[in-house]
Structure formats: structure tokens, C-alpha cells
Amino acid sequence: MRFAAEPPEGPSLAEQAATRSTADLVAARADESQRLMDAGTLVMVRLGIEGRPTVAEIVREAGLSNQAFYRHFKSKDDLVAAIVDAGARRLAGYVEHRMRAFDEPEDQIREWVAAVLAQATDPKVAEPTRAVTWNRNTLAADRESAARRAESLVWAQLEGPLAALGCDEPRQVAYLIGKTVFGVLAEALWADEPASDDELAFVADFCIAAATSSAGPPTGSRKG
């Protein structure tokens, strides 16, 4: 009969409702977690190096409860590690965006160095970076290890340009350049004056020279 309804396809109405409910809960929890991370960063910046934030200060800044905090983070260290991880992922996206503006591998490496060190040379970014870095220094070994893994996302972006320059071991060289430049960043965050353009160019020149000076260790230096 033409007026007979077609049988329904897909999930039931109850299943659709459950899916919506789950999605809403996930979104609410993600928003709650982000509010806590944003609040933690704000409190760190406000305290500077005069003190480390407490959970009570963070939840008060976020307008949430202790229960909400511990729903997402086991401790304040977990929150700091999450902030470091999120910052490294944002930096990776920012660096990638800047590198895409250049075609030549040397230019990409220079832009990578400039983008990473901008965390110290740009006052708007330097203040929260300095505060988070100072609080990061007290992280337990396992959480600090997780933070370092997140940073590897940033220096992994050097592998393509290094390979294009003829580097035999782009992953290892990217790691060494990354550790070097992040070390310079840590020093620059506490410098009396921001690094000059010449100083930034020197760091980039050093990294490129280190990557291109040799395709590998001198003959006889490898064992096995």
C-alpha cells in the first residue's frame, strides 16, 4: 500500500538519545578540563616565581570545585604536565604553519628556529611560557618524561628539511637540534633582554652548519 510507512533504518531513538547524551557529556568534560588548564596558567603567571599555585587557587580561578579538578587530574603535577603537553602541541602547529611559507629547506629550518625562540622574544608568549617552565621544574620523572615526548612533536618537523639537505640521519639530527634550541629557549626566557635578530640568526646558522657539515661520523668512529 502506498501510504504504508517505510521501516526505520539506523540506530533506535533511544540509541540516538544516548549518543547525544554521551557527546554532550564529553563536550562538557572537555570544556571543564580546558577551564582548569587555562586557570592554572593564569595563576602561574600571576604568582611568577614567588610561589606555586595550589589546587584551591586553580579551582577558584576556574569557578569550579575540587571534585571537578580531581575528575580530570590526579594531582597538580598532572595539570602542569597537561598544560606543557598542550603548549607543545600548539607550538608544533604554529611552527608548521610558519614553515609552510617557505620552500627551501634552509629557510624552513631558520623559520623553525625563529618560531621556537619566539616563545622568549614575544612578550605576550614569554610570560606564560616562563611561568609554566618554572613550575615544570618540580614535575616527577614520569610526568616530565611525558612533557619531553610532547616536545618531540616540535623538533620532528625538522626531519623533512634535514633530509632535503642530504642529512643521513634526519631524526637523530632533528633531536639534537631540537634539544639545543630548546636549551637556548630556556636560557632566553630568563635573559635581561630579548635576543636580537643577529643572535637568532646565529642560532639558525649554527643548526644548519651542524646538519650539513658532515653526512656522518668520520671513518672508524662507528663501532660494530
Image: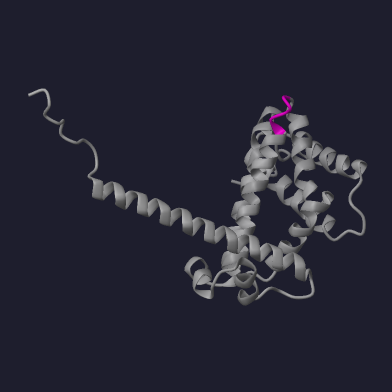
Nearest the eye: 109 or 171: 109
Residue 44: % across, % down? 72, 67
In the rendered structure, the answer to whether residue 61 lies left or right of residue 190 reads left
Q: Is residue 205 above or below residue 16?
A: above
Q: The N terminus appears in which quarter of the rendering?
A: top left
Residue found at the far left of this picture: 1
- Number of numbered markers: 0
Residue 100 lies in the magenta stretch: yes
Q: Judge by depth and name the residue closer to the eye, 33 or 179.
A: 33
Say if the magenta span includes residue 117. Answer: no
Main secondary-structure element of the magenta-colored stretch: loop
Residue range corresponding to the magenta coloring: 99-103
Q: Is residue 158 visible?
A: no
Q: Residue at x 61, y 46 (%)?
A: 153
Question: Which percent across, then down, holds residue 187?
Answer: 83, 58
Question: Which residue of the protein is positioned furthest toward the top in this rendering?
Answer: 2
Report the front residue among 206 and 36.
36
Residue at (61% x, 53% y) in the render: 86
| Residue 93, horizontal then vertical, whole percent | 64, 41
Q: Residue at x 82, y 57 (%)?
A: 189
Residue at image position (74%, 25%) is 104
- Residue 36 drawn above or below residue 160: below
Residue 41: x and y, percent?
68, 62
Residue 124 horizontal side relative to residue 34, left or right: right
Please say whether residue 125 is visible from this viewpoint: yes
